[in-house]
């Protein structure tokens, strides 16, 4: 089970924080299915890379802060916070250059030592409130 938690840490540290799409095959199963905190669903490595690129285009200095990881069998639950500087079009809002942060949780399901399925739920109400407040 330790390898699963390490893969989740790598998922956030390398794929998200470092924005290293070349490492996607080392973490994600080839049949990877993803439902992101922003409501989009993607399949496969290319689909996930598009999602990561979209978030990084909208949010500079983007970081995922892991607050808690719980592992059982082939699943890991993560509680985290996402944060970044609103530098590009995001959820229909023009850039404000202001920092936004929102809480989230994710359920990772593994096939072997790679993530096969990921379901993420984020506090979009809080995020949208910040985006609205920052534009004035």
Image (cartoon, grey):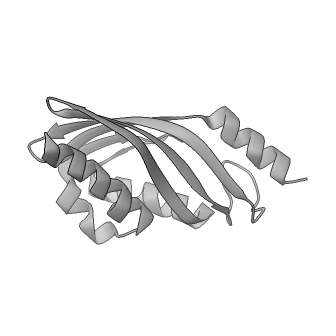
Height in image: 10 above or below 106? below
Q: Residue at x 47, y 63 (%)?
A: 53
Taking the image as shown, residue 42 lies to the left or right of residue 70, namely right
Quarter of the figure with residue 129: top right
Q: Residue at x 28, y 49 (%)?
A: 8
The residue closer to the viewer here, 92 or 16, is 16
Residue 4 horizontal/vertical position (percent): 18, 44
Q: Nearer the viewer, residue 49 or 125?
A: 125
Please tell me which residue is depicted at 81% across the width and 45% down the height of the picture: 132
Res 26 quadrant in image: bottom left
Question: Which residue, as the protein is rendered here, is positioned at the far left?
Answer: 112
Tell me where residue 131 appears, x and y as whole percent.
75, 48
Asked whether, in this view, residue 3 is left or right of residue 86, the answer is left
The reply to whether residue 60 is in sight is yes
Residue sticking out furthest to the front: 67
Provide residue 107's location: percent of width, then percent of height: 33, 33
| Residue 78 point in image, percent of width and height | 37, 38
Q: Quadrant of residue 61?
A: bottom right
Image quarter where the N terminus lies is top left
Q: Disc count in the image?
A: 0
User: In the orientation shown, which residue stands out farthest toward the right?
Assistant: 136
Residue 120 visible, this orientation:
no
């Amino acid at each position: 089970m330790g390898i699963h938690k390490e893969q989740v840490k790598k998922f956030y540290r390398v794929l998200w924080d470092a924005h290293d799409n070349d490492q996607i095959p080392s973490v994600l199963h080839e049949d990877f299915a993803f439902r992101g905190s922003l409501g989009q669903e993607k399949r496969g490595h290319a689909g996930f890379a598009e999602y990561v690129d979209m978030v990084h285009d909208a949010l500079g200095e983007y970081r995922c802060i892991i607050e808690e990881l719980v592992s059982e069998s082939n699943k890991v639950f993560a509680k985290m916070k996402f944060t970044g500087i609103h530098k590009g079009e995001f959820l229909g809002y023009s850039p404000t250059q202001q920092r936004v942060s929102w809480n989230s949780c994710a359920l990772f399901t593994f096939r072997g030592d790679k993530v096969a399925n990921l379901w993420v739920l984020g506090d979009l109400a809080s995020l949208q409130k910040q985006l609205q407040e920052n534009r004035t």
